[in-house]
Amino acid sequence: MRMFKKVCVKKNSGVALVTTIFMMLILIPATIWLLSFLDNQLQLVNKEKQIKIATGIANDVIVDYMRQFSQNYYEGHYDLSVLSRPEYFYDQGFSSVTVVPNAQQHTVYIESVGAYAKDKNNILVDRKVSALIKFISDMTDYGTYINGSFTISASNVTYYGKWWITGDLSITGSNVNFMGGPVIVGGRISGGTGCKIYGNLYYGGSSKGNVTVYGNTYNFYPSGMVYPTIKETFYIANSNYKITTDRTLKFEAYPSSSAFLIVGTTITVPIVESGMIILGENVNLTVYGTVKGRVTVVTTNTSSTKGKIIVGLYNTEANLLYYNPLTGGTTTYSYYGNSFAGIASNGITFQGKTTSTTKDLIACGAFFDRSSSNINAVGASGKKFVLYGSRNKPISLSGFSSVELIYDQYLNESPPHGLPERPILVNLDVR
Protein backbone atom coordinates (compact mmCIF):
# COMPACT_ATOMS: atom_id res chain seq x y z
CA MET A 1 0.00 0.00 0.00
CA ARG A 2 2.81 2.42 0.88
CA MET A 3 4.69 1.56 -2.32
CA PHE A 4 1.66 2.41 -4.32
CA LYS A 5 1.39 5.86 -2.72
CA LYS A 6 5.02 6.66 -3.42
CA VAL A 7 4.62 5.79 -7.06
CA CYS A 8 1.55 8.07 -7.33
CA VAL A 9 3.44 10.93 -5.75
CA LYS A 10 6.29 10.58 -8.19
CA LYS A 11 3.89 10.49 -11.08
CA ASN A 12 2.04 13.61 -9.87
CA SER A 13 5.31 15.46 -9.33
CA GLY A 14 6.44 14.67 -12.84
CA VAL A 15 3.19 15.87 -14.33
CA ALA A 16 3.40 19.10 -12.33
CA LEU A 17 6.98 19.67 -13.44
CA VAL A 18 6.10 19.10 -17.07
CA THR A 19 3.09 21.37 -16.73
CA THR A 20 5.20 24.08 -15.11
CA ILE A 21 7.83 23.88 -17.80
CA PHE A 22 5.14 23.93 -20.47
CA MET A 23 3.50 26.98 -18.93
CA MET A 24 6.83 28.73 -18.66
CA LEU A 25 7.52 28.01 -22.32
CA ILE A 26 4.22 29.71 -23.13
CA LEU A 27 4.11 32.47 -20.54
CA ILE A 28 7.68 33.73 -20.87
CA PRO A 29 7.48 34.35 -24.65
CA ALA A 30 3.97 35.73 -24.20
CA THR A 31 5.16 38.06 -21.49
CA ILE A 32 8.11 39.14 -23.57
CA TRP A 33 5.81 39.71 -26.53
CA LEU A 34 3.34 41.66 -24.38
CA LEU A 35 6.08 43.83 -22.93
CA SER A 36 7.45 44.43 -26.41
CA PHE A 37 3.95 45.20 -27.68
CA LEU A 38 3.32 47.65 -24.87
CA ASP A 39 6.69 49.28 -25.48
CA ASN A 40 5.86 49.64 -29.19
CA GLN A 41 2.45 51.05 -28.33
CA LEU A 42 4.06 53.51 -25.96
CA GLN A 43 6.49 54.54 -28.67
CA LEU A 44 3.62 54.94 -31.12
CA VAL A 45 1.68 57.05 -28.62
CA ASN A 46 4.75 59.18 -28.05
CA LYS A 47 5.30 59.42 -31.80
CA GLU A 48 1.70 60.46 -32.38
CA LYS A 49 2.03 63.02 -29.61
CA GLN A 50 5.19 64.40 -31.22
CA ILE A 51 3.52 64.51 -34.65
CA LYS A 52 0.50 66.26 -33.19
CA ILE A 53 2.67 68.85 -31.46
CA ALA A 54 4.80 69.42 -34.60
CA THR A 55 1.66 69.79 -36.75
CA GLY A 56 0.13 72.18 -34.23
CA ILE A 57 3.26 74.35 -34.25
CA ALA A 58 3.18 74.52 -38.06
CA ASN A 59 -0.56 75.26 -38.09
CA ASP A 60 -0.09 78.09 -35.61
CA VAL A 61 2.02 79.89 -38.20
CA ILE A 62 -0.82 79.82 -40.75
CA VAL A 63 -3.30 81.00 -38.12
CA ASP A 64 -0.97 83.87 -37.22
CA TYR A 65 -0.80 85.04 -40.85
CA MET A 66 -4.59 84.82 -41.28
CA ARG A 67 -5.01 86.87 -38.10
CA GLN A 68 -2.56 89.48 -39.41
CA PHE A 69 -4.30 89.73 -42.78
CA SER A 70 -7.75 89.97 -41.18
CA GLN A 71 -6.70 92.93 -39.06
CA ASN A 72 -5.64 95.06 -42.03
CA TYR A 73 -7.44 94.74 -45.38
CA TYR A 74 -5.25 97.39 -47.03
CA GLU A 75 -1.57 96.85 -46.27
CA GLY A 76 1.09 94.24 -45.56
CA HIS A 77 -0.21 91.51 -47.84
CA TYR A 78 2.72 91.31 -50.25
CA ASP A 79 5.57 93.09 -48.47
CA LEU A 80 8.27 90.61 -47.46
CA SER A 81 9.54 92.94 -44.77
CA VAL A 82 6.16 92.57 -43.07
CA LEU A 83 5.62 88.90 -43.93
CA SER A 84 9.02 87.54 -42.87
CA ARG A 85 9.24 85.63 -39.60
CA PRO A 86 12.26 84.48 -37.56
CA GLU A 87 12.38 80.97 -36.18
CA TYR A 88 10.09 80.77 -33.16
CA PHE A 89 11.07 78.48 -30.29
CA TYR A 90 8.64 76.76 -27.95
CA ASP A 91 9.01 74.45 -24.95
CA GLN A 92 8.73 71.40 -27.19
CA GLY A 93 10.03 72.57 -30.56
CA PHE A 94 10.30 75.43 -33.03
CA SER A 95 8.78 76.74 -36.25
CA SER A 96 10.19 78.17 -39.45
CA VAL A 97 8.42 79.58 -42.49
CA THR A 98 8.88 80.38 -46.18
CA VAL A 99 6.57 82.98 -47.76
CA VAL A 100 6.08 83.69 -51.47
CA PRO A 101 3.82 86.73 -52.13
CA ASN A 102 2.42 87.44 -55.59
CA ALA A 103 0.98 90.93 -55.85
CA GLN A 104 -0.14 90.43 -59.47
CA GLN A 105 -2.15 87.30 -58.66
CA HIS A 106 -3.17 88.62 -55.22
CA THR A 107 -1.97 85.50 -53.48
CA VAL A 108 0.46 84.51 -50.73
CA TYR A 109 1.93 81.01 -50.58
CA ILE A 110 3.11 79.93 -47.13
CA GLU A 111 5.09 76.82 -46.19
CA SER A 112 5.59 76.44 -42.46
CA VAL A 113 7.60 73.75 -40.66
CA GLY A 114 6.82 72.66 -37.15
CA ALA A 115 9.54 70.62 -35.43
CA TYR A 116 9.31 68.60 -32.21
CA ALA A 117 12.79 68.89 -30.74
CA LYS A 118 14.77 69.71 -27.64
CA ASP A 119 17.20 71.66 -29.81
CA LYS A 120 17.69 72.39 -33.51
CA ASN A 121 20.34 69.70 -33.87
CA ASN A 122 18.13 66.94 -32.50
CA ILE A 123 14.82 67.05 -34.38
CA LEU A 124 12.64 64.07 -33.48
CA VAL A 125 9.66 64.84 -35.73
CA ASP A 126 8.82 67.61 -38.20
CA ARG A 127 5.71 68.41 -40.19
CA LYS A 128 5.17 70.80 -43.09
CA VAL A 129 1.96 72.73 -43.61
CA SER A 130 1.53 74.62 -46.89
CA ALA A 131 -1.25 77.13 -47.51
CA LEU A 132 -2.37 79.27 -50.43
CA ILE A 133 -4.16 82.46 -49.41
CA LYS A 134 -6.12 84.42 -52.00
CA PHE A 135 -7.10 88.04 -51.40
CA ILE A 136 -10.48 89.15 -52.72
CA SER A 137 -12.21 92.50 -52.35
CA ASP A 138 -15.93 92.51 -51.66
CA MET A 139 -16.01 95.58 -53.90
CA THR A 140 -15.31 93.29 -56.86
CA ASP A 141 -16.70 89.98 -55.55
CA TYR A 142 -20.33 91.18 -55.49
CA GLY A 143 -22.16 92.75 -58.41
CA THR A 144 -24.39 94.58 -55.92
CA TYR A 145 -23.54 95.11 -52.26
CA ILE A 146 -25.64 97.55 -50.22
CA ASN A 147 -25.26 98.46 -46.58
CA GLY A 148 -28.87 98.71 -45.44
CA SER A 149 -32.29 97.87 -46.85
CA PHE A 150 -33.05 97.87 -50.56
CA THR A 151 -36.16 98.07 -52.74
CA ILE A 152 -36.43 96.73 -56.29
CA SER A 153 -39.36 98.48 -57.98
CA ALA A 154 -38.59 97.59 -61.60
CA SER A 155 -40.33 94.64 -63.28
CA ASN A 156 -39.03 92.17 -65.84
CA VAL A 157 -35.40 92.82 -64.95
CA THR A 158 -32.47 90.41 -64.61
CA TYR A 159 -29.50 90.99 -62.30
CA TYR A 160 -26.18 89.19 -62.75
CA GLY A 161 -23.55 88.37 -60.16
CA LYS A 162 -23.59 87.90 -56.41
CA TRP A 163 -25.88 90.11 -54.31
CA TRP A 164 -25.32 91.22 -50.71
CA ILE A 165 -27.85 93.34 -48.83
CA THR A 166 -27.19 93.82 -45.11
CA GLY A 167 -30.79 94.83 -44.34
CA ASP A 168 -34.24 93.91 -45.70
CA LEU A 169 -34.96 93.30 -49.40
CA SER A 170 -38.32 94.52 -50.71
CA ILE A 171 -39.25 93.41 -54.24
CA THR A 172 -42.25 95.43 -55.40
CA GLY A 173 -41.71 94.71 -59.09
CA SER A 174 -42.61 91.41 -60.72
CA ASN A 175 -40.59 88.82 -62.66
CA VAL A 176 -37.24 89.86 -61.18
CA ASN A 177 -34.45 87.35 -61.82
CA PHE A 178 -31.09 86.90 -60.10
CA MET A 179 -28.48 85.01 -62.10
CA GLY A 180 -25.25 83.60 -60.69
CA GLY A 181 -25.96 83.86 -56.95
CA PRO A 182 -25.71 83.63 -54.13
CA VAL A 183 -28.13 86.27 -52.92
CA ILE A 184 -27.35 87.21 -49.30
CA VAL A 185 -29.91 89.24 -47.34
CA GLY A 186 -29.29 90.28 -43.77
CA GLY A 187 -33.00 90.72 -42.98
CA ARG A 188 -36.29 89.52 -44.43
CA ILE A 189 -37.50 89.43 -48.05
CA SER A 190 -40.94 90.76 -48.96
CA GLY A 191 -42.82 90.63 -52.24
CA GLY A 192 -41.20 88.97 -55.19
CA THR A 193 -44.11 87.82 -57.38
CA GLY A 194 -42.53 85.79 -60.18
CA CYS A 195 -39.06 86.39 -58.73
CA LYS A 196 -36.50 83.66 -59.35
CA ILE A 197 -33.02 83.16 -57.88
CA TYR A 198 -30.78 80.90 -59.97
CA GLY A 199 -28.35 80.15 -57.17
CA ASN A 200 -28.34 79.87 -53.38
CA LEU A 201 -30.25 82.19 -51.04
CA TYR A 202 -29.22 83.22 -47.53
CA TYR A 203 -31.58 85.38 -45.50
CA GLY A 204 -31.50 86.28 -41.83
CA GLY A 205 -35.10 87.44 -41.37
CA SER A 206 -38.42 85.69 -40.83
CA SER A 207 -39.59 85.48 -44.45
CA LYS A 208 -38.25 84.98 -47.94
CA GLY A 209 -41.35 86.40 -49.64
CA ASN A 210 -42.65 84.98 -52.93
CA VAL A 211 -39.20 84.09 -54.20
CA THR A 212 -38.53 80.83 -56.04
CA VAL A 213 -35.02 79.53 -55.45
CA TYR A 214 -33.31 77.20 -57.94
CA GLY A 215 -30.59 76.26 -55.50
CA ASN A 216 -30.34 75.88 -51.73
CA THR A 217 -32.17 78.12 -49.26
CA TYR A 218 -30.61 78.90 -45.87
CA ASN A 219 -32.50 80.83 -43.22
CA PHE A 220 -29.45 82.45 -41.63
CA TYR A 221 -27.05 85.29 -42.29
CA PRO A 222 -23.52 83.91 -42.88
CA SER A 223 -21.08 84.69 -40.11
CA GLY A 224 -18.01 86.80 -40.80
CA MET A 225 -19.77 89.15 -43.25
CA VAL A 226 -18.02 92.50 -42.79
CA TYR A 227 -19.20 95.28 -45.08
CA PRO A 228 -16.34 97.12 -46.87
CA THR A 229 -15.13 100.35 -45.37
CA ILE A 230 -12.98 102.97 -47.05
CA LYS A 231 -9.79 103.97 -45.27
CA GLU A 232 -9.30 107.49 -46.57
CA THR A 233 -5.93 107.93 -44.89
CA PHE A 234 -4.58 104.98 -46.90
CA TYR A 235 -5.39 106.65 -50.23
CA ILE A 236 -4.02 110.00 -49.10
CA ALA A 237 -0.74 108.36 -48.07
CA ASN A 238 -0.44 106.03 -51.08
CA SER A 239 -1.74 108.06 -54.02
CA ASN A 240 0.42 108.22 -57.13
CA TYR A 241 -1.03 111.50 -58.39
CA LYS A 242 -2.93 114.22 -56.55
CA ILE A 243 -5.42 116.70 -58.04
CA THR A 244 -6.62 119.77 -56.14
CA THR A 245 -8.76 121.50 -58.83
CA ASP A 246 -11.93 120.24 -60.56
CA ARG A 247 -10.72 118.35 -63.62
CA THR A 248 -11.77 116.05 -66.44
CA LEU A 249 -9.54 113.02 -66.99
CA LYS A 250 -9.40 111.27 -70.34
CA PHE A 251 -7.76 107.81 -70.24
CA GLU A 252 -5.76 106.86 -73.29
CA ALA A 253 -4.24 103.48 -74.16
CA TYR A 254 -1.67 102.40 -76.73
CA PRO A 255 0.09 99.08 -77.42
CA SER A 256 3.17 100.03 -75.42
CA SER A 257 1.90 102.69 -73.00
CA SER A 258 -1.07 104.16 -71.18
CA ALA A 259 -1.82 107.48 -69.53
CA PHE A 260 -4.51 109.96 -68.65
CA LEU A 261 -4.78 113.41 -70.10
CA ILE A 262 -5.94 116.28 -67.92
CA VAL A 263 -8.38 117.85 -70.35
CA GLY A 264 -7.84 121.56 -70.95
CA THR A 265 -4.14 121.35 -70.12
CA THR A 266 -1.01 119.96 -71.72
CA ILE A 267 -0.49 117.53 -68.82
CA THR A 268 -0.34 113.83 -69.63
CA VAL A 269 0.32 111.45 -66.72
CA PRO A 270 1.62 107.91 -67.37
CA ILE A 271 -0.22 105.04 -65.66
CA VAL A 272 2.00 103.28 -63.12
CA GLU A 273 2.47 99.70 -64.26
CA SER A 274 2.12 98.17 -60.79
CA GLY A 275 -1.20 99.99 -60.25
CA MET A 276 -2.22 103.60 -59.82
CA ILE A 277 -4.23 105.63 -57.31
CA ILE A 278 -5.41 109.06 -58.48
CA LEU A 279 -6.55 111.24 -55.59
CA GLY A 280 -8.84 114.25 -55.95
CA GLU A 281 -8.71 116.33 -52.76
CA ASN A 282 -11.90 118.34 -52.25
CA VAL A 283 -12.64 118.36 -55.99
CA ASN A 284 -15.09 116.94 -58.53
CA LEU A 285 -13.59 114.69 -61.20
CA THR A 286 -15.04 113.63 -64.56
CA VAL A 287 -13.57 110.48 -66.12
CA TYR A 288 -13.93 108.78 -69.49
CA GLY A 289 -11.82 107.07 -72.15
CA THR A 290 -9.96 103.77 -72.41
CA VAL A 291 -8.22 102.39 -69.33
CA LYS A 292 -5.07 100.32 -69.59
CA GLY A 293 -3.65 99.15 -66.27
CA ARG A 294 -5.19 98.90 -62.81
CA VAL A 295 -6.51 102.33 -61.86
CA THR A 296 -8.42 103.67 -58.85
CA VAL A 297 -9.80 107.20 -58.71
CA VAL A 298 -10.63 108.45 -55.20
CA THR A 299 -12.17 111.75 -54.10
CA THR A 300 -12.29 113.40 -50.69
CA ASN A 301 -14.22 116.49 -49.69
CA THR A 302 -14.42 119.19 -47.04
CA SER A 303 -17.10 121.09 -48.96
CA SER A 304 -20.66 119.81 -49.49
CA THR A 305 -20.40 120.51 -53.24
CA LYS A 306 -17.13 118.64 -53.79
CA GLY A 307 -16.00 115.02 -53.77
CA LYS A 308 -18.10 113.83 -56.74
CA ILE A 309 -17.09 111.46 -59.54
CA ILE A 310 -18.85 111.91 -62.89
CA VAL A 311 -18.43 109.05 -65.36
CA GLY A 312 -19.19 109.60 -68.99
CA LEU A 313 -20.05 112.33 -71.40
CA TYR A 314 -17.57 115.10 -72.15
CA ASN A 315 -18.26 117.00 -75.39
CA THR A 316 -19.02 114.09 -77.77
CA GLU A 317 -17.14 111.27 -76.00
CA ALA A 318 -18.84 109.26 -73.29
CA ASN A 319 -17.77 105.71 -72.49
CA LEU A 320 -15.34 104.40 -69.89
CA LEU A 321 -13.90 101.17 -71.31
CA TYR A 322 -10.87 98.86 -71.11
CA TYR A 323 -8.08 98.41 -73.63
CA ASN A 324 -8.12 95.21 -75.71
CA PRO A 325 -4.52 94.25 -76.60
CA LEU A 326 -5.65 91.71 -79.21
CA THR A 327 -7.51 94.19 -81.38
CA GLY A 328 -6.01 97.48 -80.26
CA GLY A 329 -9.57 98.58 -79.55
CA THR A 330 -11.76 98.36 -76.47
CA THR A 331 -13.56 95.76 -74.36
CA THR A 332 -16.03 95.84 -71.49
CA TYR A 333 -14.48 93.08 -69.34
CA SER A 334 -11.31 93.20 -67.27
CA TYR A 335 -9.87 89.85 -68.37
CA TYR A 336 -6.77 91.44 -69.96
CA GLY A 337 -5.56 92.76 -66.61
CA ASN A 338 -7.06 96.23 -66.98
CA SER A 339 -9.50 97.46 -64.34
CA PHE A 340 -10.98 100.62 -62.87
CA ALA A 341 -12.50 101.69 -59.56
CA GLY A 342 -14.27 104.91 -58.69
CA ILE A 343 -14.48 105.67 -54.95
CA ALA A 344 -16.33 108.91 -54.34
CA SER A 345 -16.80 110.67 -51.02
CA ASN A 346 -19.83 112.67 -52.11
CA GLY A 347 -21.72 111.02 -54.97
CA ILE A 348 -21.34 109.22 -58.31
CA THR A 349 -23.14 110.19 -61.51
CA PHE A 350 -23.15 108.28 -64.78
CA GLN A 351 -23.57 111.08 -67.30
CA GLY A 352 -25.06 110.36 -70.73
CA LYS A 353 -26.57 113.79 -71.33
CA THR A 354 -25.35 117.37 -71.45
CA THR A 355 -27.11 120.52 -72.60
CA SER A 356 -26.01 119.86 -76.19
CA THR A 357 -25.42 116.11 -76.52
CA THR A 358 -26.99 112.78 -75.56
CA LYS A 359 -25.32 109.38 -75.86
CA ASP A 360 -25.67 105.74 -75.03
CA LEU A 361 -23.36 105.21 -72.07
CA ILE A 362 -21.20 102.20 -71.19
CA ALA A 363 -19.23 102.35 -67.94
CA CYS A 364 -16.85 99.69 -66.66
CA GLY A 365 -15.47 99.26 -63.16
CA ALA A 366 -16.14 98.88 -59.45
CA PHE A 367 -17.98 101.88 -58.03
CA PHE A 368 -18.27 102.82 -54.35
CA ASP A 369 -20.19 105.91 -53.24
CA ARG A 370 -19.59 106.99 -49.64
CA SER A 371 -22.40 109.55 -49.58
CA SER A 372 -25.88 108.96 -48.16
CA SER A 373 -27.56 109.35 -51.58
CA ASN A 374 -28.15 106.90 -54.39
CA ILE A 375 -25.88 106.69 -57.41
CA ASN A 376 -27.38 108.68 -60.32
CA ALA A 377 -27.59 107.84 -64.02
CA VAL A 378 -28.65 110.80 -66.18
CA GLY A 379 -29.51 110.25 -69.84
CA ALA A 380 -32.10 110.88 -72.52
CA SER A 381 -35.11 109.10 -73.94
CA GLY A 382 -34.16 106.41 -76.41
CA LYS A 383 -30.69 106.04 -74.91
CA LYS A 384 -29.25 103.06 -73.01
CA PHE A 385 -27.04 102.85 -69.93
CA VAL A 386 -24.93 99.72 -69.34
CA LEU A 387 -22.71 99.10 -66.31
CA TYR A 388 -20.13 96.31 -66.44
CA GLY A 389 -18.86 95.78 -62.92
CA SER A 390 -20.16 96.41 -59.42
CA ARG A 391 -21.85 99.09 -57.33
CA ASN A 392 -22.62 99.67 -53.65
CA LYS A 393 -25.79 101.76 -54.03
CA PRO A 394 -29.12 101.71 -55.82
CA ILE A 395 -29.00 103.60 -59.13
CA SER A 396 -31.58 106.35 -59.64
CA LEU A 397 -32.35 106.63 -63.35
CA SER A 398 -33.26 109.85 -65.13
CA GLY A 399 -34.00 109.94 -68.84
CA PHE A 400 -32.47 106.63 -69.97
CA SER A 401 -34.96 104.33 -71.68
CA SER A 402 -33.17 101.15 -70.62
CA VAL A 403 -30.46 100.01 -68.24
CA GLU A 404 -28.34 96.85 -67.96
CA LEU A 405 -26.26 95.93 -64.91
CA ILE A 406 -23.76 93.22 -65.83
CA TYR A 407 -21.34 91.74 -63.33
CA ASP A 408 -17.69 91.51 -64.42
CA GLN A 409 -16.42 88.22 -62.96
CA TYR A 410 -12.85 89.01 -64.02
CA LEU A 411 -12.53 91.92 -61.59
CA ASN A 412 -11.58 89.42 -58.87
CA GLU A 413 -8.63 88.22 -60.92
CA SER A 414 -7.34 91.70 -61.74
CA PRO A 415 -8.86 94.13 -59.23
CA PRO A 416 -8.22 97.86 -59.35
CA HIS A 417 -5.24 99.00 -57.31
CA GLY A 418 -5.58 99.68 -53.59
CA LEU A 419 -8.98 98.16 -52.79
CA PRO A 420 -9.55 96.63 -49.35
CA GLU A 421 -9.28 92.85 -49.64
CA ARG A 422 -9.97 89.98 -47.27
CA PRO A 423 -7.93 86.77 -47.04
CA ILE A 424 -9.43 83.46 -48.14
CA LEU A 425 -7.69 80.17 -47.39
CA VAL A 426 -8.09 78.31 -50.68
CA ASN A 427 -5.72 75.39 -50.04
CA LEU A 428 -4.18 73.71 -46.96
CA ASP A 429 -1.90 70.69 -47.13
CA VAL A 430 -0.22 68.84 -44.24
CA ARG A 431 2.65 66.45 -44.89
Image: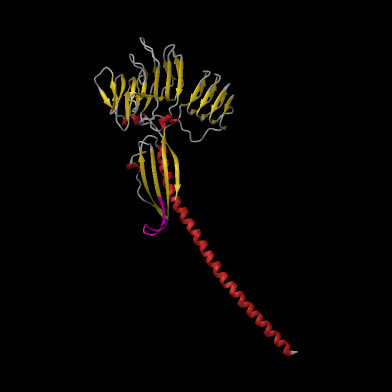
Residue range highlighted in magenta:
113-125
Q: Quadrant location of residue 21?
A: bottom right
Residue at (36% x, 43% y) in the render: 100
Relative placement, left or right, of 225 versus 190 is left
> Hey, which quadrant is residue 172 in on the image?
top right
Percent across and percent down for residue 349 are 40, 18
Whether residue 124 appears in magenta in the rendering, the answer is yes
* Residue 261 at x, y percent in the picture: 28, 21
Work out which quarter of the rendered image holds the N terminus and state it: bottom right
Q: Is residue 141 above or below residue 84?
A: above
- Predominant secondary structure, magenta span: strand
Residue at 43% over, 30% down: 409
In the image, 124 versus 250, the foreground residue is 250
Is residue 347 shown to the viewer in this render? no
Residue 268 appears in the figure: yes
Q: Residue at x 33, y 42 (%)?
A: 80
Q: Is residue 179 left or right of residue 371?
A: right
Vertical arrangement, residue 24 with respect to residue 263, above or below: below
Residue 34: x and y in percent read 56, 67
